């Protein structure tokens, strides 16, 4: 007898992929129709949310021209969010820009990281932005170490209870993996030494280093006025 298990599995995967593409196309057509129906004087945030949704669907769909189209929509959404001080939504839009993998995607990540540290948005979203940098940098990069330390600091500072414990477990593992690839660190003693050496235990030391990393990523191409945004921060 001939074993048809592999061919049956491949056929099932093809069917599921085809159904997924059809579903995404339907969603894209529906959202685009809704966008066209918006009146010029509609709530700008309603337009931004819809454009962001369309950009996300485009990124999931793939295909020729989709990243470029997604970029235009997500960038406009980002600008609207920033104009209305919707900083968490702005970071989501920047994440979409980053995932287009177009030439400006790393600059978008730099902006997302700056907002994630400066404003008290969803800490888990902020940590994802730090992880993006970790994943995008060479093994020996000190920038990855600083980003991992910042992720751990954000979890400690902004989360509470069981959520804090579970997320800090993940950020601890992130630091350990960065240390291993950076300096072949394999045990706790080596990790402690490595963190002391790179000054990763004191946010007063590693946060300014993160600012330098972000400045290098953005390379002067800032899409907002940082001084103006700092002035909007709540006074404790």
Image: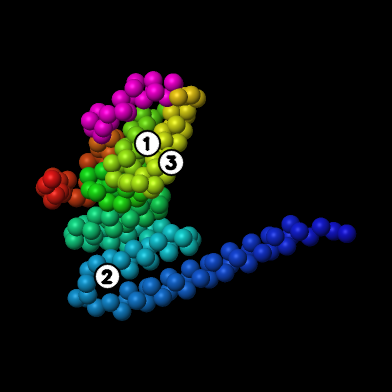
Magenta residue span: 189-209
Marking on residue 220: none
Judged from the image, the secondary structure of the residue bearing numbered disc 1 is: helix
Residue 222: x and y, percent? Answer: 22, 46
Query: Would residue 43 be found to the left or right of residue 177 on screen?
Result: left
Q: Secondary structure at mark 3?
A: helix
Residue sitting at x 43%, y 74%? 29
Q: Residues within 10 Å of mark 3 (few under 14, many from 20)?
A: some
User: Mark 2: few, some, or many residues within 10 Å (few <14, many ≥20)?
Assistant: some
The N terminus lies in quadrant:
bottom right
- The residue carrying mark 3 is 170
Is residue 152 depicted above or below 222 in this figure?
A: above
In this view of the protein, can residue 131 be seen by the observer? Answer: no
The CA distance from mark 3 to mark 1 is 10 Å
Give the residue number, with chain letter if any, for mark 1: 148
Secondary structure mostly seen in magenta is helix
Vertical relation: 172 (above or below) 103: above
The residue lying toward the viewer, choosing from 11 and 232, is 232
Residue at the image position 74 percent from the left and 57 percent from the top: 6
């Amino acid at each position: 007898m001939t074993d048809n298990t592999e061919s049956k599995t491949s056929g099932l995967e093809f069917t599921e992929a085809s159904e997924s593409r059809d579903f995404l196309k339907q969603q894209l057509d529906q959202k685009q129709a809704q966008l066209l129906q918006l009146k010029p004087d509609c709530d700008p945030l309603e337009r931004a949310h819809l454009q962001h949704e369309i950009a996300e669907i485009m990124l999931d769909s793939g295909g020729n021209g989709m990243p470029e189209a997604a970029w235009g929509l997500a960038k406009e959404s980002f600008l609207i969010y920033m104009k209305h001080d919707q900083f968490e939504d702005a970071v989501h839009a920047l994440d979409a820009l980053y995932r287009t993998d177009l030439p400006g995607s790393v600059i978008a990540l730099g902006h997302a990281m700056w907002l994630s540290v400066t404003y008290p948005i969803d800490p888990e979203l902020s940590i994802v932005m730090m992880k993006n940098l970790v994943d995008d940098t060479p093994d020996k990069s000190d920038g990855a170490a600083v980003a991992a330390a910042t992720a751990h600091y954000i979890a400690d500072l902004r989360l509470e209870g069981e959520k804090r414990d579970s997320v800090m477990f993940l950020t601890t593992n992130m630091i350990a993996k960065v240390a291993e690839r950076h300096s072949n660190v394999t045990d706790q003693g080596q990790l402690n030494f490595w963190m002391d050496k790179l000054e990763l235990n004191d946010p007063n030391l590693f946060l300014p280093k993160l600012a330098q990393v972000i400045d290098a990523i953005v390379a002067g191409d800032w899409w907002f006025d940082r001084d103006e945004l700092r002035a909007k921060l709540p006074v404790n």
